Image (cartoon, helix red, strand yellow):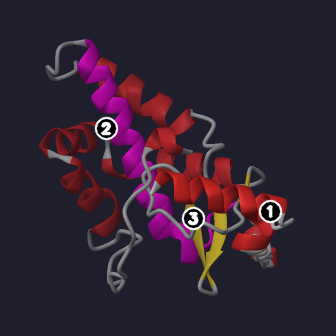
Amino acid sequence: MRPALAAWLVLSLLGGRGAQDMCGDPPATPSHSVPAPQLSPEERLSPHMPESLRCDACHAIAFQIEEQLSKAEGKVGKKALRESDYIEVLERSCSQDWESYGVLELDGEKRLSGPGLPRQQPLSVMVSGGPWPSRLSKLCHGYVGERGEAQIYEAHRRGPAVLRQLLCHGDKGPCAGRKDRPDPPKALQNEL
């Protein structure tokens, strides 16, 4: 079998038929064009988080609070933090730079994107920076002020779902009354 294969290869090369001719040209790579989301004047200029993005923003904030509190507890051996410590962690959580978050358009709907939020389409353009970090920081401080540090820390100790419920899905939460839409798997913090 091997001598026949070698003979065929030699004859093919001598006959002027290279591998490219035998296999054909590589298929053309299709080109894709992905436009950036078109932001309304409110989305571009308002100092406040647009109503349509508040549920996503709340989930991002809950994720960051959970991450920061868990990291702080890990440093003390998973024990409960002292009040002064969790107050400091919550302040740091809300005062972080939030630069890894932005807005993208998914199926004609604008969504906030970043760590702890549902993963988006592989081909999408995210608009980050600008007003988004300050809006997230302001909302985070608002949630901590409304709910109180002790209540937020207690919810964290009971689990991430309890914290999200407290901040986002309660009677007055930004996700209250929203139909749950199926979300793809969540992006991990270090994927971005």
What number is the disc on residue 149? 2
Q: Nearer the viewer, mark 3 or mark 1?
A: 1
Between the C-alphas of marks 1 and 2, the distance is: 72 Å
Instruction: Pinpoint residue 56: horizontal percent, then vertical percent.
Output: 48, 65
Q: Give the range drawn in magenta.
A: 47-75
The residue under the point 46% across, 42% down is 189
User: In screen coordinates, is 42 left or right of 99?
Assistant: right
Q: Say which quadrant the N terminus sits in.
A: bottom left
Q: Residues within 10 Å of mark 1 (few under 14, many from 20)?
A: few
Q: Which of marks 2 and 3 is in front?
A: 3
Circle 1 residue: 18
Between the C-alphas of marks 3 and 1, the distance is: 51 Å
Quick check: marks 1 and 2 in contact, CB under 8 Å? no
First of labels 1, 2 by sequence position: 1
Q: Nearer the viewer, residue 88 or 7?
A: 7
Above or below, 189 against 87 in this view is below
